[in-house]
Amino acid sequence: MVKTLIFDFGDVFIDLNKDATVIEIQKFGTLMLSEKMLQVNANYETGKISTDDFLNYYKTQFPNTTKKQLREVWNAIILHFPEHRLQFIEQLSEEKKYQLILLSNTNELHIKKVIENMTIERYNRFKNCFEAFYLSHEIHFRKPNKDIYQFVLETHTLKASTCLFIDDKKENTETAKKLNLHTWNINPKTEDITNLFTKMNHLF
């Protein structure tokens, strides 16, 4: 029986344009992100480097850009948080049938943009729905690495088989599945988190 629901954030609650940042970077003359860039991004996402360090690195790669431009390019992925999803999670929280946890690969610039788009009032409404609200840059773990799931399970003394993990990325749900969590690899183009219980009826 599922007692704990563990949610991803991007493309589960908030809409993303996953191609936007790469498309914008290509305007600077780079066709794809290098291995070094991907490593810097991962370090930033796990809080191993600061926002200043992150922007300074990209400034050396694209010296003709400003930090303001770089922030805008990096945040181009972040879209809007539909109200019906906020109302859904608020209702779920009020019912108190499940323990609710958020587990997101999110960096400092992105979460600031999320708050800017949502407004601080709506963001706090969302955050207050969860018993725990884990962002990768704050806890220094990131999906799909196994240790981030183990961190959540151990911190909350959870039995994996009583947890349902919802994420839009297959590699993230695959790791969780190997640890015996139930999973829903949600497709943001065809599915909506508000249909959670319809999906659960099919899963169990």
Image (cartoon, rainbow, N blue to C red):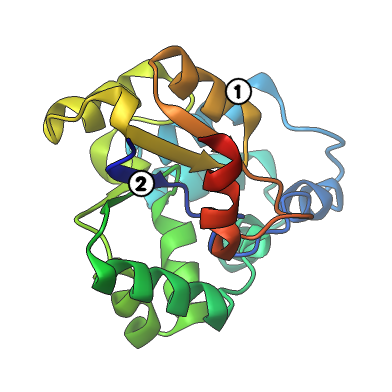
Circle 2 residues within 10 Å: few <14, some 14–19, many ≥20: some
Is residue 192 visible in the rendered image? The answer is: yes
The image quarter containing residue 4 is top left
Q: What residue lies at 51% left-to-right and 32% top-to-bottom? A: 183
Q: CA distance from mark 1 to mark 2?
A: 35 Å
In the picture, measured across the screen, residue 187 lies left or right of residue 180, that is right
Tell me the kind of residue under disc 1.
Lys
SS type, badge 2: strand
Is residue 66 visible in the rendered image? The answer is: no
Residue 129's x, y, as percent? 28, 68
Circle 1 residues within 10 Å: few <14, some 14–19, many ≥20: few
Compared to residue 134, the image places residue 109 above or below, namely below
Front: mark 1 or 2: 2
Residue 30's x, y, as percent? 83, 38
Disc marking residue 128:
none
Compared to residue 161, the image places residue 65 above or below, namely below
Please report whichever mark, 1 or 2, sits nearer to the chain's N-terminal start: 2
Compared to residue 107, the image places residue 72 above or below, namely below
Judging depth in this view, the residue of 122 and 187 nearest the camera is: 187
Q: Which residue is mark 1?
A: 36
How many numbered discs, if any? Answer: 2
Residue 55's x, y, as percent? 50, 50
Q: Which residue is mark 2?
A: 5
Compared to residue 189, the image places residue 152 above or below, namely above
Judging depth in this view, the residue of 42 and 97 nearest the camera is: 97
